[in-house]
Image (cartoon, coloured by chain):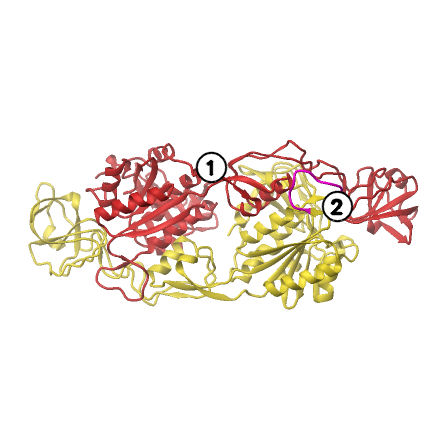
Chain colours: A yellow, B red
Amino acid sequence: MFLYELMPVQKAEKILRSNLNTAGTEIVNLDQTHHRVLAQNVVSLLDAPPFDRSAMDGYAVRAEETFGHSEENPVQLKIVDRIGAGKVSKMDLKKGNAIQIATGAPIPFGANAVVMEEYTQSHQDHLEVRTTVIPGENVSPSGEDFITGDLILKAGRVLNPAEIGIIASAGYSEVEVYNKPRVGVMVTGSELVMPKSQLEGAEIINSNHFTVKSLVESALGVPDMIHCVDDHDLVREEFLRLLKNNDCLITTGGTAISKGDVVVDVANELGEVLIHGVTLRPGKPFAFAVVEDKPVFMLSGFPVAAMVQFDVFVRENLLRMQGLERELNFITKTAARKIPSTLGRTDYIRARQEGDAVRPLKIKGSGIIRSMVESDCYIIMEENLEGVGSGEKCMVLPYHFLQV
Amino acid sequence: MFLYELMPVQKAEKILRSNLNTAGTEIVNLDQTHHRVLAQNVVSLLDAPPFDRSAMDGYAVRAEETFGHSEENPVQLKIVDRIGAGKVSKMDLKKGNAIQIATGAPIPFGANAVVMEEYTQSHQDHLEVRTTVIPGENVSPSGEDFITGDLILKAGRVLNPAEIGIIASAGYSEVEVYNKPRVGVMVTGSELVMPKSQLEGAEIINSNHFTVKSLVESALGVPDMIHCVDDHDLVREEFLRLLKNNDCLITTGGTAISKGDVVVDVANELGEVLIHGVTLRPGKPFAFAVVEDKPVFMLSGFPVAAMVQFDVFVRENLLRMQGLERELNFITKTAARKIPSTLGRTDYIRARQEGDAVRPLKIKGSGIIRSMVESDCYIIMEENLEGVGSGEKCMVLPYHFLQV
């Protein structure tokens, strides 16, 4: 298979995007929503704050009575009540009076400002105010944050600490979120064994089990893992079982382009293979099918190729399946050395950032897992580039930008 | 309390750093290590790959026999064996012979290169090779990735998919990681209630319960949540109970600087208060104590102040308690408008990035939780700055840089 027979990366991305399903929604307790995606618009049930409240520990006063007063020329008031947080004063504040007030407590009727404690001196019910406050000073007015009926958050937002806090403040103890997609993962390869300290014959350690499982977790999916030998009937059986129990399927191995290979053959029998071979390096033998109306992402057996294919083709689509559409940010850095590429092919080159520069790793090979551990970003060479020279700008995607 | 009586942020950071404990380590199955911090150096038990293997589907040959051959001038060989992945050929490859080989299978004895399937034509045991390969072509040599005894990963590293994959490849099915710190969280405030759609009197929704819980989770800690009214004896009782069951304690509320306040008072009775009041805005009333040899982080009751204090003083220290020391990256952007600040105070200003520029939000107030939801970064004004003018450079910390 030659380059011109492969599908351009952007075309493949479009096909993926238009063949997704969604994982549905559920209502969960707000305590359980961290890192979930909001599936409803949140409209506030309350004003926040719900009343004019004190922003400081001090004394509620009529501001006018402090006008012109200072350290040298204090005003004398009478303390007629004391209200802690969570308490309401039953008194109206009359002329000449003050009410001691805690941060967060409601401003008593008749008062319009709070004098900070450090600008006062008190003895029993006698208060000396040594400053001037203006109306509204140290008062957080009702509805300052938002009011009843305000649209607080829109569906499609990832719920991080601030978002969860504002939903609580808007009066909700539970909220509708997208289900995390259940992702069947079938790692194929008769040679694969679980980690052990002695290998025999042609055995290779099944590192894909561990990388793909945690990649799915990093995309907020729930992995359902299986290893399968390269046997057509077994692959077919597991393929159907995993699809039945999950929202989508990821496979590794068995996607060779030059000939029919077991995984792609099975996908072709059971459904429609829409992509087989893309202009991506590493990761050319990526394939994609729709089987039983569910997306099937077929990755390479080589660990690095599989990881790059996940980053390019899978992560954002697992996020879309749970209602999250985001735009990845890229940055521009200076190539620390010449980086060759090929016109018509998209390269994801493992690299390290060095200040404003970026240096491609020397180790390549799509089996070299060390290259993923030692790199901290991709240099992305788009199809229209034949490489860049040393000192030229290139497009960089730091791995941590991929995090949700 | 005035600015000169407050502790500079950097001095507070040093005190925190030198008063931490660690949460210990445990050995866990590699399947359960995603987002844990490695507590051991990992030295490979194996070579990877463990043997010279084929990088392609094709035919193992003696490279010399293909020299000078091409599409127009093919060489004829005899196929003497076929080996799939996971299989080993028992044959030595003799002159004039080829062995069909799958990607990943061991190179047979006597062969030194693999011809890709697409450059061949076969009929039964007859093979026509239409290209020249050089010795080593399409062969991944044994130990190419790493060899037995190589130091693969050092302790202190967060385990993401690539790291977990390489530990598996090095022969380990389990590994030593730091325990996640157990974090007691006491949200104080008699006025606080769980979310509901109608509030009465001075009630305020306890949004800190939700934000601090998920902040602790985002720092890979395990939160143990309690709400406590502002009562000295109850606070003292819960303080001791939470410290007994956890590695550290976070409180919110009750840290007013102007006078003794319930949480700081209790900390002072039970242990040593090392910090009370810092030159930070928002977040001035931050306090820190060591009680029963465990760190106690005392945050403000105001949601935004508490979140900023967590970002500045708590997150990195919870990470250190589980063996992770990292350097936060900052970026430089252009201020979209004048940003005032005060000499001697560190400001964390909620802002939005706009390309190369950054714009502070108009809404301020340490109770305005909307400002955290609508911003995507902090502008950090260090103590030696009196603000920056419009168009001047400033230091920016995007929120997603805080993610682990």
- Locate residue A68, reporting x and y percent: 11, 48
- Locate residue A240, reporting x and y percent: 66, 64
Q: Quadrant of residue A250?
A: bottom right
Q: Secondary structure at mark 2?
A: loop
Query: Which residue position is annotated with label 2?
Result: B104
Quarter of the image for the N terminus of chain B: give it.
top left
Q: Residue at x 52, y 50 (%)?
A: A403
Tag 2: residue type? Gly
**Residue contact between numbered discs 2 and 1, judged by CB atoms under 8 Å:** no
Q: Is residue A289 visible?
A: no
Q: Nearer the viewer, residue A330 or B272?
A: B272
Neighbours of disc 2 within 10 Å: few (<14), some (14-19), many (20+): many
Q: Residue at x 75, y 45 (%)?
A: B104
Q: In this figure, what is the number of numbered marks?
A: 2
Which chain is home to disc 1?
Answer: B
Q: Is residue A195 shown in magenta?
A: yes
Neighbours of disc 1 within 10 Å: few (<14), some (14-19), many (20+): many
C-alpha gap between disc 2 and disc 1: 37 Å
Q: Residue at x 49, y 66 (%)?
A: A25
First to last magenta residue range: A193-201
Query: Which residue position is annotated with label 1?
Result: B323
In the rendered image, residues at marks 2 and 1 fall on the same chain: yes
Q: Is residue A273 left or right of residue B63?
A: left
- Locate residue A325, reporting x and y percent: 52, 59
Q: Quadrant of residue B69?
A: top right
Tag 1: residue type? Gly
Q: Secondary structure at mark 1?
A: loop
B312, above or below A235, in the image: above
Disc nearer the start of the sequence (2/1): 2
Q: Is residue A217 visible?
A: yes
Q: Is residue B16 left or right of residue A296?
A: left
- Locate residue A143, reporting x and y percent: 28, 61
